[in-house]
């Protein structure tokens, strides 16, 4: 391993969201925050050096999104995920959530139905409701081994002629699935039959663990390519959320023109000069760093598995195939959601996301972000182990 993730910079005296909001969200600043999905791992040096290099020029004014930056992303997607986008397919966006909102506006109207598959990242359903669309929930099913799968029959039974858009989370946040080709093709056939556009959030696509392989929805077939709006970016992969930089790929010209009507109305412009440099450098130089990062994250995940396994069925880690977000099944603890949250804050001194924020299917679950330096992860493990040990006298 060339890169070392043993330690990371202190963020307590910065404006880092996960630290600044501790008192407001958890009632205390004594918790270690492991909720919002950025990493307590230093953003790679090749990204920061590109920003420093750009700052050698003394004017930071309006700048067009560089063609070379999109070309670097297109090359990355081809090499890493086997999909080829064209330069004309690509649009800048400052976030996946913003892109999702534009897709809802572009491909549906007030009163139309939009499909979400819960439990899921909260903006999926918030964005639908904020646009006065009807939320069509197609909950995932959980197998006996804890693995989540699509409920295709439920999906087919709920669709009608007012259903216009499906919001796909791939890989899935928070359950950590890398959807197989067969699973995605089942979704594709349903959407093709009913003329449903697919907005595919693939922001975690680079964080799939071997032997799992992310399959872009648009890569399934020419028909899939024609109905898909793909949201991708560097934010999760390289811990660059603060650069407010992502992109949208829309190969179908008709869909792209519809999307652009909403896009131009909002006036997205071209993003930050410094973000352009960071974005391009990440895709040009990030391969080796990412491979080392994934090895480190997997080790953190194994540590979490090990400590939870000590307590049998009280707390279980849902098996994941991607992301750095652990979906903790705490139903065996036999306490309600309010008590569960209180346990993690007051006894474990950890700030997690409550499962219910991902939909009612998150009842009894908590989400823990394990994208931490080794030093910080060991502290999380220590606190969790101590709290569980005291509670269950082990």
Image (spheres, rainbow, N blue to C red):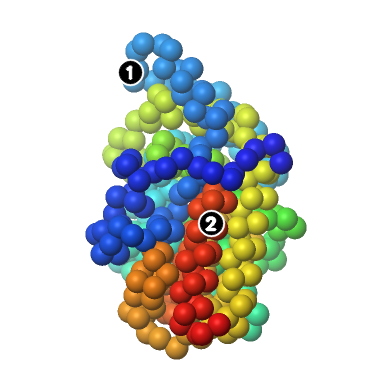
Where does the C terminus fall, quadrant-wise? bottom right
Image x and y of residue 143, in percent: 62, 81
Left of 109 or right of it: where is 8?
A: right
The answer to whether residue 312 shows anywhere in this view is yes
Q: Quadrant of residue 34?
A: bottom left
Image x and y of residue 266, in percent: 29, 40
Q: Which mark is residue 12?
A: none
Looking at the rendered structure, the secondary structure element under dot 1 is loop
Residue at horizontal 71 percent and vertical 58 percent from the top = 212
Measured in 3D between alpha carbons, the distance from the residue under mark 1 to the one under mark 2, in whole angstroms, is 40 Å
- Viewer-closest of 388 and 2: 388
Residue at horizontal 46 percent and vertical 40 percent from the top = 9
Residue at horizontal 40 percent and vertical 39 percent from the top = 242
Per the image, the residue denoted by label 2 is 377
Badges 1 and 2: C-beta atoms under 8 Å apart? no
The answer to whether residue 204 shows anywhere in this view is no
Per the image, the residue denoted by label 1 is 61
Name the mark nearer the viewer: 1 or 2.
Answer: 2
Residue at horizontal 62 percent and vertical 40 percent from the top = 4
Lower position in the chain sequence, tag 1 or tag 2: 1
Image x and y of residue 355, in percent: 42, 72
């Amino acid at each position: 391993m060339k890169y070392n993730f043993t330690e990371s910079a202190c963020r307590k005296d910065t404006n880092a969201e996960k630290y600044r909001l501790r008192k407001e969200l958890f009632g205390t600043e004594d918790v270690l925050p492991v909720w919002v999905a950025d990493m307590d791992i230093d953003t790679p040096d090749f990204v920061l050096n590109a920003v420093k290099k750009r700052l050698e020029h003394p004017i930071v004014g309006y700048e067009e999104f560089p063609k070379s930056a999109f070309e670097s992303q297109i090359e990355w997607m081809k090499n890493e995920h086997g999909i080829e986008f064209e330069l004309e397919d690509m649009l800048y966006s400052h976030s996946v959530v913003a892109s999702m909102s534009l897709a809802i506006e572009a491909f549906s109207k007030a009163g139309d139905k939009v499909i979400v598959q819960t439990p899921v990242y909260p903006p999926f359903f918030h964005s639908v409701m904020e646009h006065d669309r009807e939320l069509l929930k197609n909950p995932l099913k959980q197998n006996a081994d804890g693995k989540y799968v699509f409920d295709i029959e439920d999906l087919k039974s709920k669709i009608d002629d007012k259903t216009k858009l499906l919001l796909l989370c791939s890989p899935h946040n928070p359950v950590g699935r890398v959807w197989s080709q067969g699973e995605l093709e089942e979704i594709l056939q349903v959407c093709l039959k009913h003329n449903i556009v697919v907005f595919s959030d693939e922001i975690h696509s680079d964080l799939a663990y071997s032997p799992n392989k992310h399959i872009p929805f648009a890569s399934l077939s020419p028909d899939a390519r024609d109905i898909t709006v793909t949201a991708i970016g560097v934010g999760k992969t390289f811990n660059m959320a603060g650069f407010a930089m992502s992109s949208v790929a829309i190969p179908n010209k008709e869909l792209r023109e519809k999307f652009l009507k909403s896009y131009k109305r909002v006036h997205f412009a071209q993003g930050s000069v410094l973000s352009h440099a960071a974005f391009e450098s990440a895709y040009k130089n990030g391969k080796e760093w990412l491979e080392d990062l994934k090895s480190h994250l997997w080790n953190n995940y194994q540590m979490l598995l090990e400590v939870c396994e000590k307590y049998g069925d009280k707390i279980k880690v849902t098996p994941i195939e991607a992301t750095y977000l652990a979906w903790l099944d705490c139903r065996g603890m036999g306490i309600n959601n309010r008590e569960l949250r209180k346990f993690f804050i007051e006894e474990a001194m950890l700030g997690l996301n409550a499962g219910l924020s991902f939909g009612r299917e998150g009842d009894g679950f908590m989400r823990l972000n394990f994208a931490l330096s080794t030093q910080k992860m060991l502290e999380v493990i220590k606190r969790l182990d101590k709290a569980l040990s005291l509670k269950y006298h082990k």
